[in-house]
Image (spheres, rainbow, N blue to C red):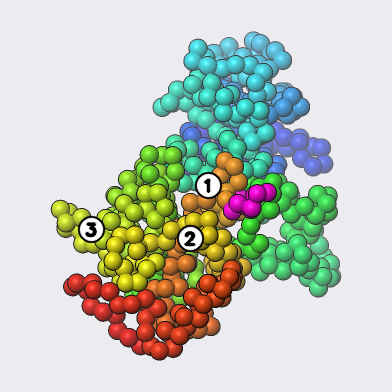
């Protein structure tokens, strides 16, 4: 159902088409979708020039003309953009199809409408201070990624918007990682803020394609360029017309793929490009509609129907945070047979002990998944509760044979889990890089985002770009590392075990791999059988 504002826009406002003619303002695909799904707290990461700012200008003008006591504010990132916006609003008013609006004041940045006692202010970030003394009913922050000191400016603006009745929309293309806009967008994606995310890529725009006749299409398809990923994008469903547009834009950008992705992203993570090169050379990321958020546990995303496979084919990696919002706890679930991400749980308020309940629940849900916990910092607490369970709640401890052990036999708590050190981290990350290069499939845009911002620093450290996170990266790496030693890894056909082909970092690692192969050849499990009480020993094949 069309909103009141959309009806006013399409019935009364005009725009200029490509030929220079005045035509009715009909909402495009992106504008219509946004109009139908606004929540009052919205953030819109997007490709360039999809008409989002034009929509909000028209929306707020419609409100000023139809709703009493509207106080609409649009803030742009620079003076030139502000002037363009002002000109657009004046055009709407001058070419309105209907009675001319009564305007009392039309100053440099402000329009007032006495019949509705409404006001519309359009300005540049930082040009005017807003605070608690002001009242804004509708606020649109345009190209926030390019504002100077956006956090300070937005704090003042937000205080002027009523919490329950005011509307706030933040919109921008990306501009690097670790900044205010990047952090705010990813929090919205994770469901950690009041803002709802609306991501718009360029693929649905009719403007972003080049017309080709049949012969031109045929010639183009015969000369796809591997170095700019055209064959891969063709398989994803892009048309020759879209690929030709992309090729022309890349030429304008001196074939800077990173710059193109930031200006014309296909997936959410492409909005935010790190200034340096990611440590991971290749990532097999596939966005799917079946990657969904759990209706009950808002911290959990999962691949629908993944758990319906037979038992003993999943691995879980756990990176444990303190639960006090300074860092996050992450649980990644991998289908070992298919080498595919099937679930991701992320929380920043969960106590390390309580996290064990999440791991037990997911481990049992994914049919006796093999669990590897990173034992750094708070990981030992999670491991202790995994072993003990929660007897007072009737929750048994997780089977010990399904917990990764770094010493065998495991006599103490310290013998369990994977400890990341200066020596083991390069091995962990190197193995993860190999697995991703060989096709380990990801579905979480947040994990893809962290991977794209994970770098090797000038002093040789492997870590997230400043202002970014790497909890998901570590958890996914730990899951794959532990999976190689799970008690059912021998069930996987040899040709499908991509994780076994790891990068070699020294003689110690090579010997460990040879020893694992020898045990397999003798028919033994890669880890010794543990005393698991009431649990039955897995059937040997």
Q: Position of residue 243 (x, y in %)?
A: 75, 60
Q: Which residue bears the numbered disc 2?
A: 476
Q: Give the residues drawn in magenta, as a range.
A: 453-462
Q: Position of residue 163 (x, y in %)?
A: 43, 26
Magenta segment's dominant SS is loop
Q: Position of residue 313 (x, y in %)?
A: 39, 74
* SS for callout 3: loop
* SS for callout 1: loop
Distance (Cα) linking label 2 and label 1: 13 Å
Residue pictured at 58% horizontal, 35% vertical: 180
**Vertical position of residue 168 compared to residue 306: above or below:** above
Q: Which residue bears the numbered disc 3?
A: 389
Q: Is residue 457 magenta?
A: yes
Q: Which mark is residue 469?
A: 1
Residue pictured at 70% horizontal, 43% vertical: 48
Please tell me which of labels 3 and 1 falls first in the chain. 3
Viewer-closest of 242 and 537: 537
Quarter assignment of residue 142: top right
Q: Is residue 225 magenta?
A: no
Badge 2, how many Cα within 10 Å: few under 14, some, many 20+? many
């Amino acid at each position: 159902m069309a909103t009141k504002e959309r009806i006013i826009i399409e019935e009364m406002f005009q725009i200029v088409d490509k030929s220079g003619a005045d035509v009715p303002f009909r909402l495009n695909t992106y504008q219509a979708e946004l109009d139908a799904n606004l929540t009052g707290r919205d953030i819109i990461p997007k490709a360039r020039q999809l008409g989002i700012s034009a929509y909000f200008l028209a929306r707020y003008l419609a409100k000023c003309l139809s709703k009493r006591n509207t106080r609409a504010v649009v803030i742009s990132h620079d003076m030139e953009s502000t002037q363009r916006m002002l000109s657009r609003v004046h055009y709407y008013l001058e070419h309105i199809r209907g009675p001319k609006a009564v305007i009392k004041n039309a100053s440099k940045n402000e329009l007032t409408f006495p019949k509705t006692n409404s006001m519309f202010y359009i300005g540049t970030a930082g040009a005017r201070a807003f605070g608690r003394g002001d009242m804004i009913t509708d606020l649109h922050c345009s190209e926030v990624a390019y504002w100077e000191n956006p956090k300070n400016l937005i704090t003042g603006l937000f205080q002027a918007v009523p919490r329950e009745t005011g509307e706030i929309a933040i919109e921008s293309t990306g501009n690097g990682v670790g900044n205010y806009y990047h952090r705010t967008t990813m929090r919205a994606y994770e469901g950690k803020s009041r803002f709802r995310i609306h991501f718009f890529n360029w693929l649905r725009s009719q403007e972003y394609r080049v017309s080709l006749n049949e012969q031109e299409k045929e010639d183009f398809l015969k000369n796809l360029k591997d170095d700019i990923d055209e064959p891969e994008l063709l398989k994803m469903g892009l048309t020759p017309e879209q690929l030709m547009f992309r090729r022309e834009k890349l030429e304008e950008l001196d074939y800077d793929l990173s710059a193109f992705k930031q200006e014309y992203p296909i997936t959410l993570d492409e909005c935010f490009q790190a200034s340096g090169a990611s440590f991971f050379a290749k990532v097999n990321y596939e966005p799917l509609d079946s990657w969904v958020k759990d209706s009950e546990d808002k911290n959990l995303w999962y691949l629908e129907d993944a758990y319906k496979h037979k038992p003993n084919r999943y691995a879980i990696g756990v990176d444990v945070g303190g639960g006090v919002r300074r860092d996050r706890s992450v649980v990644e679930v991998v289908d070992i047979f298919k080498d595919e991400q099937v679930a991701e749980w992320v929380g920043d308020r969960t106590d390390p002990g309580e996290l064990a309940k999440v791991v037990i629940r997911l481990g049992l849900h994914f049919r006796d998944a093999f669990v590897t916990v990173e034992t750094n910092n708070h990981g030992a607490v999670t491991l202790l509760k995994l072993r003990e369970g929660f007897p007072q709640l009737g929750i048994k401890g997780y089977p010990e044979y399904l917990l990764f052990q770094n010493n065998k036999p495991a006599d103490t708590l310290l013998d369990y889990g994977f400890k990341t050190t200066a020596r083991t981290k390069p091995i962990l990350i190197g193995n993860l890089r190999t697995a991703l290069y060989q096709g380990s499939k990801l579905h979480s845009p947040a994990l893809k985002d962290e991977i794209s911002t994970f770098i090797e620093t000038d002093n040789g450290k492997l870590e997230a770009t400043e202002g970014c996170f790497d909890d998901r990266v570590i958890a996914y790496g730990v899951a794959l590392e532990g999976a190689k030693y799970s008690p059912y890894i021998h069930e996987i056909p040899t040709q499908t075990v991509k994780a076994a082909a790891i990068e070699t970092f020294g003689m110690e690692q090579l010997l460990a791999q040879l020893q694992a192969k020898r045990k397999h050849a003798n028919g033994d499990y890669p880890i010794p059988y543990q005393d698991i009480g009431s649990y039955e020993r897995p059937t040997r094949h």
